[in-house]
Amino acid sequence: MNDSFLQSLSAWQFDNRFVKSLPADPLRDNRRRQVKNACYSFVEPVPAKQPELVAVSEEMLRELDLDPATLDLQLFAEIFAGNRLLPGMQPYAMCYGGHQFGNWAGQLGDGRAII
């Protein structure tokens, strides 16, 4: 593991403003359901089997204050696949609703996408 890359990642700070400001689903079990009176549900990502990095943008790495020369491909893949959480990360799935094809579709957030 590249220590320089890990040090760069440890400098990241997550403010988690969304989860601090809005109501959370009180249930923590991971199952399909209607979520009432909440904007999101806390979830733990299900680990991906053998994540690997297919492509990376050096421009975006620099935007994230990561040096492309110190990039640890395996660690990067594990973090961005959700297999490994950095200190301060609070993964959640949004609850949302909306109109589809001119009709109210009700609650649409189903937890497949984790932020």
Image (cartoon, helix red, strand yellow):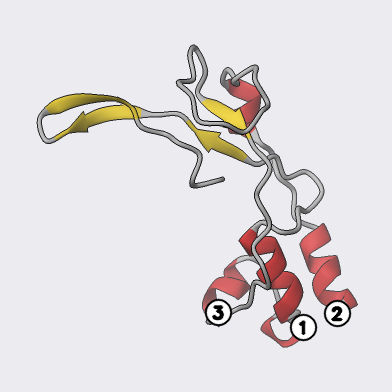
Q: Which mark is residue 70?
A: 1
**What's the distance in space between the residues labelled 2 and 3, CA to CA?**
17 Å
Where residue 64 appears, as percent x and y from the top left, is: 63, 65
Disc 2 marks which amino acid?
Asn
Residue 56 circle label: 3
Q: Residue furthest toward the bottom?
A: 69
Q: Secondary structure at mark 2?
A: loop
Which residue: 62% across, 62% down?
Answer: 81
Q: Is residue 109 left or right of residue 52?
A: left
Choose the circle earlier in sequence order: 1 or 3. Answer: 3
Marks 2 and 1: in contact by CB < 8 Å? yes
Identify the image quadrant of residue 107: top left
In the image, 48 versus 5, the foreground residue is: 48
Q: Residue furthest front?
A: 31
Q: Earlier in the sequence, mark 1 or mark 2?
A: 2
- Residue type at numbered disc 3: Val
Q: Distance between the Cα atoms at labels 1 and 2? A: 7 Å
Label 1 sits on what residue type? Thr
**Which of the two residues, 92 or 71, is positioned nearer the viewer here?**
92
Q: Which residue position holds label 2?
A: 2
Residue 10 location (% of width, % of height): 83, 59
Label 3 element class: loop
